[in-house]
Image (cartoon, rainbow, N blue to C red):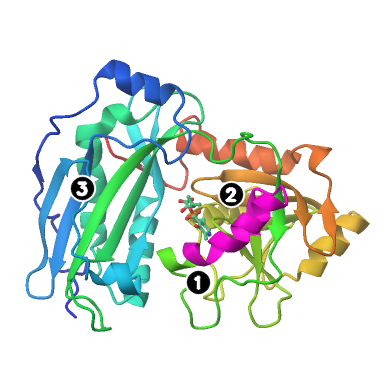
Amino acid sequence: MTTTTDTATAFPLAFTTTPSQAARDQAERDAILASPGFGKHFTDHMVQITWTLDDGWHDAAVVPYGPISLDPAASVLHYAQEIFEGLKAYRHADGSIWTFRPEANGLRLQRSARRLALPELSVVDFLESLRQLIAVDGAWVPSAPETSLYLRPFMYASESFLGVRAAQKVDYRVIASPAGAYFHGGVEPVSIWLSTDYTRAGRGGLGAAKTGGNYAASLLPQAEAYQHGCAQVLFLDSEEGKYLEELGGMNLFLVRHDGTLITPSLRGTILEGITRESVIQLAKDRGHAVEERPVAVDEWRDGVASGEITEVFACGTAAVITPIGELKSPDFSIGDPGRGAGEFTMSLRQELTDIQYGRRPDRHGWLHRLG
Ligand code: PLP
Ligand code: COI
C-alpha cells in the first residue's frame, strides 16, 4: 500500500467547494444552536477526499451534507475497516474559531489507519480539511458557554470487494455537529457500571485504535449500564479482569488525598486520549505527581473506603472532564453519587475549558486557529 506522508505533502490538497442549496437560514440555525444536545444536528456541508491505490489521495471537496452512496459490497459494511476522530471547534469572545491540539488527532488518525490497514492522510491535509469545513460552516460554531462544534473526521473502506484484504479504495469525510453537554445532567457526577462479563480489547487487538468495532463491542455492556442507572460502562483488562482500562468513550483518573493523579498506563488496549495527555500536563504544571501504571479495581474500592482516593473523574473530548460519583458492579458499589463534584476535578475542568475557550493563556501552544 502506498501512503501519503507529511514530508511527501508539504502543501495541502486543493479543495473545491459546492455550496448547499438546502442550507438552513440564520433563524433555523439559531434555533438548533440554542439547544444543540450532542450528535443530533449536523451542519450544511461536509468534506470528502477519496483515496485509491493507484492515485493516492485526490478529489478533495467540500460538498452539501447528505447521504453517502455505497455499493452493497463495500468492504466497510462487511469487515468494518473504518476509523474516526473527534475534536471540537470553540468560539472565542472575539468571534474567532479555534480547535484544541488537532495535530494530535491527525497523528492518532494515522496510527489508527496503520492498525486498520487504511491509507494515512497527512496531518497537513487533516488540518486543511477542518479549516475548509469551518470556512463554509463557521456560523455553526455556537457561542453560548460550554458549547462547541464537534468535528467528526472518519475514513472507511469503500471498495466493492468481498475478499478479505485491505481495501484499494477508501473515503475520508468530515462532518460537524453543534454540541452542548455530552451527559444529560451537565457537569453533575455520573454513576459508572463495571462490566464483569465483557471486555473491550485484548493484547494485540484494536484497543488503541479509534475504530467503530471498539464502540460496537461496548454497546451491549453500555445498555447494561443504562439498565443499572449508570451513564457509562467501565472495562477491565481482558487477561486478569483486575485492572482498570477505560470507559466506553472516555479515559479515567483517580485522585489520591495527597493530590497524586493515578491513571491506567497505555498498554495498547486503551485509547491514547488527548484530553488524558492534557490533564497529565496541567496536573504536572501545578506540581502534582502523576502515576501512569496498572491500576487494580480493588485499589479504587479500598481507596474510597479508607479515604485514600478522594476523587475520580472521566475525561475525553465529548465529556471534557466529568466527575464520577459512583462505581456499581454486580457485587459491590463504591462512592456516593450525592456527594457532589470534587474540587480538584472541577478546577482542572475549569482550567482546561478556560484554555480551550481562550479565557486563559495557551502556554503550551495547544490552540490552532480555524477561522
Ligand atoms: N477512550 C475512548 C474509548 C474514547 O472514545 C475517547 C474519546 O475520544 C477517549 C478515550 C478520550 O480521547 P480524547 O481525549 O482524545 O477525546
Ligand atoms: C469523543 O470524545 O470524541 C468520543 O469519541 C467519545 C464518543 C463517546 C462521542
Where disc 3 sits, the SS reads strand
Q: Which mark is residue 207?
A: 1
Q: Is residue 43 magenta?
A: no
Q: Residues within 10 Å of mark 3 (few under 14, many from 20)?
A: many
Q: Are marks 3 and 2 in contact (CB under 8 Å)?
A: no
In front of the other: label 2 or label 1? 1
Kindly identify the residue that appears in the image at 51 percent across and 31 percent down.
Answer: 146
The part of the image, by quadrant, that contains residue 265 is bottom right
The residue wearing badge 3 is: 47
Secondary structure mostly seen in magenta is: helix
- Nearer to me, 246 or 164: 164
Q: Residues within 10 Å of mark 1 (few under 14, many from 20)?
A: many
The residue wearing badge 2 is: 282
Kindly identify the residue that appears in the image at 21 percent across and 71 percent down.
Answer: 73
Magenta residues? Answer: 215-233
Question: Where 138 sits versus 125, above or below?
Answer: above
Amino acid type at image mark 1? Gly
